[in-house]
Amino acid sequence: MPVHNNEIADIFEELADLLEIEDANPFRVRAYRNGARTVRSCGKSMHDLLNQKKDLSTLPDIGEDLAEKIKVIVETGKLPLLEEIESRTPSALSDLMKIEGLGPKRVKTLYKELRIKSLDDLKRAALSGKIRELKGFGRKTEQRIRERVEHFAGEAPRTRLTEAEEIAATLVDYLRNTEGVKDVIVAGSYRRRMETVGDLDILVTTSRNSPVMDRFSDYDEVDEVVSKGKTRCTVHLRSGMQVDLRVVPQVSYGAALHYFTGSKAHNIAVRKLGVKKGYKINEYGVFRDDERIAGRTEEEVYEQVGLPYIPPELRENRGEIEAARDDRLPELIRLEDIRGDLHCHSNASDGHHSLKQMAKAGVECGYEYLSINDHSRHVTVAHGLDKKRLLEQIKEIDKLNERLDGIVLLKSIELDILENGSLDLPDSVLKELDFTVCAVHYKFNLSRSKQTQRILRAMDNPYFNILAHPSGRLINEREPYEVDLEKIMEAASERECILELNAHPDRLDLTDERCMMAREMGVKMSISTDSHSTSDLDFMRFGINQARRGWLEAKDVINTLGLAELKKLLMRDG
DNA sequence: GCCGTTTTCGGCCCGACTGTTTTCAGTCG
């Protein structure tokens, strides 16, 4: 199996940790971390890029040296330099750095003085009281280490955006209702609308002497106050989520919002532009010498470095700065651009509502059309439709459409792609549908080449229109199946097949990087909710978030079209 | 180790909070 980008990135991260413990040049350490980030977030696999003879050193933050190291890792699965370093600095030390409050310096001291090289060693030493005697440590530090190591359960999982929204909404209301508080806004990856968030970053502006800091640390859901100062406070909630609160004066609102929204890589890039112009940019504003020349709004900050406003979803340092400089930022798709939903279930299979109820809910969304895509017969647990039941549903939809006002129900299906690449129902019934949505629902563990062939073969069928949830992943629950999405996108582009961006917050499949790739390859996409009830139609906004992160414009997405144009586009020879 | 519309060498974003200190290193975001 080819080496994954994540594995390469993990190797670079570990290398960075160990080098940092060895007190290596901090800029060299940073270079490995930057390289890891580039590899991890690259839409294409290093393995494939090398097969295509691409020059990896053209990737940002990858130079000659890292390009060569990536090649070695892809070819051998290992990196000699890392093995050499591990021979003198145990690799488990990088695990110790995951304990909050332990960085490279302290880990090094623990190893040199007490030979601590594992979490077990650390726990024993903390209990024995030896740590407090070390220079630079003390009672409190030892106490904290003891608590942290006892409760350490690996890296905290990231929270899905939809759950983060629930946690954030109550907290934001609570903070708003505080004397002297003006703005309360959730920044960070939440504002960049990432599919998952690691913690919540909340920015507050206040008039003088607001008690907001105390009110925050007194919040009922707070489990532990990690740190608390005049302008910044960090807590852990009972749910396990970390929340950072930052308080700034209103005159700094834009600069603070920019700083706190990130991403870190984007901020660094913008600050570097500032340095070139002789400015210093921090969370309080843009400064020329000691004079604040901007910072009330984010627009002001960008203006000072010669850029137009960049929407939060693009701020990942994935080319948005260069695009902004050259005036070629995409005109990102908006929720209002969506004219209908192309993947919805009814109670004929595993949905909860009737055709009529779904249609009515579609009208409330302001849609022109909504398609019904119940499962096909192979998905027996979902009571999938066979030929007879599908033909009955088609008749029912035709009859209902005569009575419906303001919306048209489209006749479709979520059709299983069988293991051999054939479709789950015969062409004789598929031709009665407006279009099809096809998907893989079993045999996720086929080899990469077999899974790819399976889908390519399905696309050969003239009735194949849209590939639903193309990677099959469930966020935090199921990894994507092994498949060559680039080949599938090439085929989709040739055969005018559509790739779905499944908007369900548990799926959000394709990922943002894959959406970027589809756009670059000229593949059209649909954004659909996979609704199993009327309320699920609201998931569209998560799909839009993801699409915007993937640089998609309305013209890249077929369900921004009116019904007539849509039908024309979905008609294939057959 | 990366990078360049001032540079192929000499830079590399910037600030808050804690604990252990007596002026600041370490960690974090």
Image: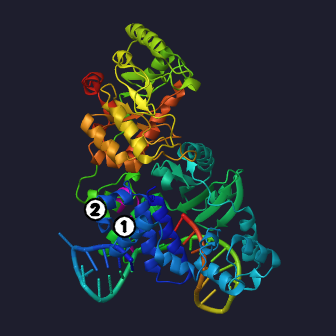
Q: Give the left or right position of residue A99, taking residue A28 as reference.
A: right
Q: Earlier in the sequence, mark 2 or mark 1?
A: 2
User: Cα distance, mark 2 to mark 1?
Assistant: 29 Å
**Residue located beneath label 1 in the image:** A269
- Front residue (pair A492, A207): A492
Count all numbered tags in the image, as a single digit.
Answer: 2
Does residue A299 belong to the magenta stretch? yes
Residue A4 sits above or below residue A142 on the image: above
Circle 1 chain:
A
**Residue at x-position 43% and y-position 41%:** A451
Residue drawn at 55 percent across, 61 percent down: A247
Expressed as whole percent of the image width and height from the top left, the position of residue A325 reads: 25, 60
Q: Name the disc covering residue A241, or none.
A: none
List the residue tagged with mark 2.
Answer: A53
Q: Is residue A122 above or below residue A248?
A: below
Badge 2 marks a residue whose secondary structure is loop
Q: Nearer the viewer, mark 2 or mark 1?
A: 2
Q: List x then y, in percent, for residue A229.
A: 63, 68
Disc 1 residue type? Ala
Q: Which residues are magenta?
A: A291-301
Q: Position of residue A165 (x, y in %)?
A: 56, 44
